[in-house]
Amino acid sequence: MISEKMHEQVKNSSVIRAMFEEGKRLAGIYGAENVFDFSLGNPNVEPPEEVKKAILEIVNDNDIGIHGYMNNSGYEEVRAAIAKSINDKFGTTITHNSILMTVGAAGGLNVILKTLLNPKDEVITFAPFFGEYRNYVKNFEGELIAVSPNTIDFQPNLKEFKDKITPRTKAVIINSPNNPTGVIYSEETIIKLSEILREKQKEFGTDIYLIADEPYRELAYDQAEVPYLSKYYANTIVGYSYSKSLSLPGERIGYLMISDQAADFENIISAANIANRILGFVNAPALFQRVIVKCLDAKVDLEAYNRNRELLYKELLSYGYQCIKPEGAFYMFVKSPIENDAEFCSLANKKNILIVPGSAFGCPGYVRIAYCVAYETIVKALPGFKALIEELK
């Protein structure tokens, strides 16, 4: 018999993954070309050519060590190259000692939460948020505290945030560009958030770590800039993934950047290395550490996502839907035409349109549309979106 904890996990299994499986079921009935699956953030844009070239170069080198173990932090030369890339982009001065290679951003988040949390410690995040944060925090007996959504512009609700910080607050997770809204947290927001954290650290005599979950950093439109948090707040940890920036979600490769200005830096680095091992990751994938270091300046075709964004936003607004235009990532967070977002998703499902209720992200009354799909998929789905809202009117 499975554990009691897993009974609860199975019961609350990811809505997004369930939608993904539903999409496969419908495709088997109606044909994949007649099912419009906007449920999962699975990039449809191919990795840059540099990635394919790097893979071939590495595997053809006949290096017998390319698939072996290394330090739990990852290859030192890879970490050094990433540190230099970060310094060149953001004016930081970190070394390879700040970088720990991880099994994607999710692996990195679990590593750092394992490193930081004691039972009953609190981790704050801002709704809407990636629903797995609850599970990641619960993995280590912490408690996720959600700040209510600001549905005007989806910048963090800093007044409520300030009130929710307690002596048990150990960390704050922010995600920008945001999943599910596509909003980029402004520099003004980051400055104010950092001021609040410094004030609360002083008030409680504690260290509060700001964890930036950044798999979508490179997916920003219209020359929008994503603030790099360690420039504003010393106790910063960045979780990065190449899943979206290089279209490599299945390869599970990313890193943690732990600011060398963070309180207890040396112990955090040491503990994170051990956490990486004892959580069963051991180390990030050897081959893809070597691949990404050859592709640090490579970029996916962002214009393909932008084309989808422009079409979907323009047409949905013309039909009467309400949403703010996403500044980054590849999600659109649309107000449900009816109060019950789950019911609206069910109605969409009947038209073979798969979208995710906002309640899965802590923000009921909205739905998430992942537009990292073929342009033709959006074109073919639009009549269904139009028919839906007309029927509900």
Image: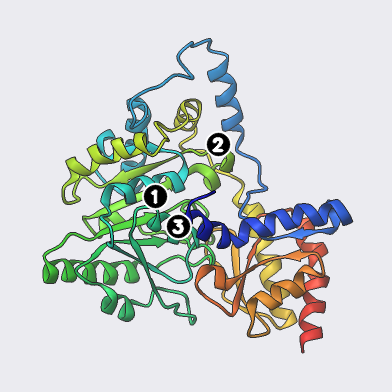
Q: Quadrant of residue 87?
A: top left
Q: Quadrant of residue 52?
A: top right
**Does the CB distance between marks 1 and 3 fall below 8 Å?**
no
* 190 shown above or below 299: below
Question: Mark 2 is on which residue type?
Answer: Glu
**Left or right placement of residue 320 versus residue 2 in this view:** right
- Foreground label between 1 and 3: 3
**Left or right placement of residue 265 versus residue 307 in this view:** left
Q: Nearer the viewer, residue 351 or 290?
A: 351
Give the x, y percent position of residue 319. 75, 80
**Does the CB distance between marks 1 and 2 fall below 8 Å?**
no
Q: Where is mark 2, residue-wise? A: 251
The answer to which of marks 1 and 2 sits earlier in the sequence is: 1
Q: CA distance from mark 1 to mark 2?
A: 17 Å
Residue beneath the point at 53% across and 46% down: 245
Which part of the image, by quadrant, shows the C terminus?
bottom right
User: Could one spot residue 307 in this view of the protein?
Assistant: no
Q: Nearer the viewer, residue 364 or 74?
A: 364
- Most extreme residue toward the front, as rendered? 1
**Left or right placement of residue 159 versus residue 385 in this view:** left
Residue beneath the point at 41% across and 39% down: 102
Question: Mark 1 is on which residue type?
Answer: Leu
Q: Where is mark 3, residue-wise? A: 135
Residue beneath the point at 56% across and 78% down: 364
Q: Residues within 10 Å of mark 2 (few under 14, many from 20)?
A: some
Q: Secondary structure at mark 3?
A: helix
- Most extreme residue toward the bottom, as rendered? 393
Q: Which mark is residue 109?
A: 1
**Does the CB distance between marks 3 and 2 fall below 8 Å?**
no
Give the x, y percent position of residue 32. 83, 52
